[in-house]
Amino acid sequence: MNLDDLFVPADPEVMERERLKAKELKRSAWWKSQIGRGVCHYCGSRVHPSELTMDHVVPVIRGGRSARDNLVPACQACNREKRCLSSSQWRIRVEEKRAAGGEGRS
């Protein structure tokens, strides 16, 4: 059994507070600089900055915070596929896709 599968979701009030912080950070010069590079943190794809989304490396539902060290720009495909997976679950999924010869995201 994988411990990542046995998580208790974060408190809804905490999650809402973190999402509000993320909205504030989206307006910051720091975030504009992050997306201005036009590169997805996970797969390295170059996309237009307007197509990048803000992803919590450690998802808010898993207790992640809306802080600079936990937020990365992600293309919509990676963000949608990662959902609320932990970092270790995401790495396993990427490795499985690569081993199967599928599209790899890192």
Image (cartoon, rainbow, N blue to C red):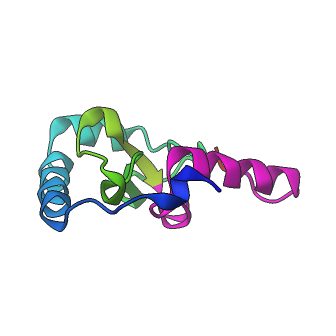
Which of the 4 image quarters holds residue 91?
Answer: top right
- Residue at image x 86%, y 51%? 99
- Image check: 95 left or right of 23? right
Q: Give the x, y percent position of residue 81.
A: 56, 65
- Residue at image x 37%, y 53%? 59
- Image check: 6 left or right of 28? right
Q: Quadrant of the C terminus?
A: top right
Q: Which residues are magenta?
A: 75-104
- Image check: 3 left or right of 99? left
- Residue at image x 13%, y 50%? 21
Closest to the observer: 47 or 91?
Answer: 91
Q: In the rendered view, would you say 89 is above or below 83?
A: above
Q: Is residue 77 magenta?
A: yes
| Helix, strand or loop: magenta stretch | helix
Q: Give the x, y percent position of residue 93.
A: 68, 55
Closest to the observer: 88 or 33?
Answer: 88
